[in-house]
Structure formats: C-alpha cells, structure tokens
C-alpha cells in the first residue's frame, strides 16, 4: 500500500468521526513515514493491541468517488488534515506561481508498477500514448509555456517522452524536491495536470482542486483505465468533472509488455 490508499482510509475515519462515529484505522509501519508528513492524521490511527474483540472491522477500499465519500467530505479532509502539514506551509505562494507560469505538470507512475511482473500485468498501460493524447488536448485549449514531468522513474521518462518538446519550448524532468512528498506537493499546487493511473496521482488532483477552489477541475486529465483483474478495469476514483481519457487509439496495452490472451480480450 502507498500514500493514496492510506489517504482513502484516513478520510473514511475522519469523515466518520465528523459524523459522530468512532472510526479508526489500524496503524501500519508502511504508513509511518507519511504520518510524519501529515501529522494531523495521527489521531485517526489505532495500534493493533488496542483493537477490541467487539470492534467492527471494515476492509473495503473506501475509494469510490461519490459513493464512498462526498466532494464535501473530501474537501474537508484535505483542508483539515493535509493542507495543515508543514509540507504545505508556503502553499499560497506556490499556487500563485503555478497560476502565473501556467505550467502543465505530468505525473508518470512507474516504480513497482513495472518492477514486478504481477503488478505490470495489472497496472501496466501505454503511458506514452495516453500522455500524448492528454497533452495534445491541453495544447489545443491554450499554449503550454512549459511542461514538468514528475515520476519515480525519470530516466524512463527522459528516454520515452522526449517528444514533449514538440508541445512546449521548455520541458523539465523532475521537480525542485528530492522526495515523494515534495513531488506530491508540486503536483498538488499545479493548475494544469495530467495524472496517471495511481491513487497517489488521484489525490494530487483532489488537493489541486481544493487549492484552486474548484476552478481548475476541467484542467485535470486522468486515464479511465486503472487496473486489470478486478470486476472492472475502469477507475472509480475519478472526479467526474475531470477530463477523462476514456480510450486510446490502440487500446491501453503497454506495447513493451507481453499479455496473455485473456487480458487482451478485456481491453
């Protein structure tokens, strides 16, 4: 599990408490670094030794937009639990700078999605084709003064997305920060975003919409594809006001990955 998954669980607990319910999320060692980044979520956690035999357990992902949480619950959680973090101490200046530069920020999720065959089979997609289509749509609406690519595999991005220079005279690979938390902040403050099929990315989009007071929802692009192997390959995490790329000319399959026939038949 990563940041995006943790945030859905923490929001579930926070919104429940706001409604008078006694909700808590089991503390996991993997989430501790992120609790340090967002200290306002700490009171939502419970240690396993403190869970009573009679406590009800909930195991659902709690991640379906408009079903598991409302837009208001999301905005409240973002304002009270995330934007209060030291990470966002200078957020007003960063948002203003983003508006002034009008930079398009592209997030590319690589890392474990492609390091492990089982995850590649589930999450792998034709990222270059998706990014090209989304950026082309953004460019058709207005000029793109600069593009910034944020990713956990910038080497791959430089090798595979060099053509972004045809859309903008300035292309940066990487941000000013050196951590996943700083990349998350840099994604979140951007007005114009191209997201990946990642809950980390979705949450950056959510926070961006709150920071820009709902005035940039139509400037956030996201792929409809999320993962294979479940009941539905379509993402149910997306804000319906985002610009959703529903299909690619040659399908979502990553041409660099071999798929079995059953996977091809799904997409």
Image (tube, rainbow, N blue to C red):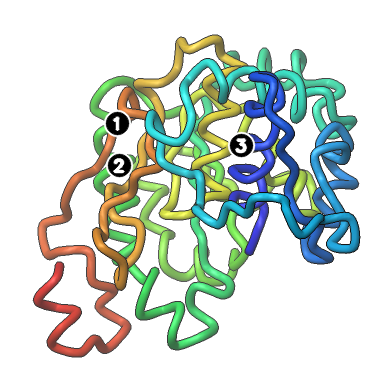
Percent position (x, y) of residue 146? 51, 34
Q: Quadrant of residue 64?
A: top left
Residue drawn at (73%, 53%), measured in percent from left and top? Answer: 54
Q: Nearer the viewer, residue 32 or 206?
A: 32
C-alpha separation, residue under disc 2 versus residue under disc 3: 31 Å
Neighbour tally class for label 2: few under 14, some 14-19, many 20 plus, Cα within 10 Å:
many
Percent position (x, y) of residue 70? 47, 23
| Residue 185 appearing in the image | yes
Q: Nearer the viewer, mark 3 or mark 1?
A: 3
Q: Nearer the viewer, mark 2 or mark 3?
A: 3
Q: Quadrant of residue 29?
A: bottom right
Give whichever of discs 3 and 1 has the lower sequence position.
3
Q: Is there a contact, CB below 8 Å, between mark 1 and mark 2?
A: yes
Neighbour tally class for label 1: few under 14, some 14-19, many 20 plus, Cα within 10 Å:
many
Neighbour tally class for label 3: few under 14, some 14-19, many 20 plus, Cα within 10 Å:
many
Q: Quadrant of residue 129?
A: bottom left
- The residue singled out by tag 1 in the image is 243
Q: Which disc number belongs to residue 134?
A: 2
């Amino acid at each position: 599990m990563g940041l995006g998954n943790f945030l859905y669980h923490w929001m579930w607990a926070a919104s429940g408490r706001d409604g008078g319910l006694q909700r808590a999320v089991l503390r996991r060692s993997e989430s501790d670094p992120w609790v340090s980044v967002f200290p306002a979520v700490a009171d939502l956690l419970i240690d396993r030794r403190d869970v009573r035999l009679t406590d009800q357990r909930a195991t659902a992902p709690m991640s379906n937009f408009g079903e598991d949480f409302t837009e208001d619950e999301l905005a409240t959680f973002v304002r009270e639990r995330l934007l209060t973090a030291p990470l966002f101490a200078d957020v007003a200046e960063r948002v203003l700078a983003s508006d002034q530069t009008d930079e398009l920020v592209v997030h590319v999720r690589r890392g474990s999605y492609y390091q492990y065959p089982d995850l590649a089979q589930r999450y792998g997609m034709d990222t270059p084709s998706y990014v090209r289509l989304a950026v082309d749509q953004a460019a058709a609406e207005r000029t793109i003064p600069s593009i910034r690519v944020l990713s956990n595999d910038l080497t791959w991005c430089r090798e595979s997305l060099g053509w972004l220079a045809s859309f903008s005279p300035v292309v940066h690979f990487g941000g000013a920060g050196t951590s996943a938390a700083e990349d998350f902040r840099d994604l979140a403050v951007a007005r114009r975003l191209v997201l990946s099929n990642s809950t980390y990315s979705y949450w950056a989009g959510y926070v961006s919409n709150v920071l820009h007071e709902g005035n940039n929802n139509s400037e956030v692009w996201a792929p409809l594809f999320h993962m294979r192997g479940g009941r539905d390959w379509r993402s149910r995490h997306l804000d319906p006001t985002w610009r959703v790329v529903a299909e690619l000319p040659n399908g979502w399959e990553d041409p660099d990955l071999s798929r079995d026939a059953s996977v091809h038949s799904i997409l």
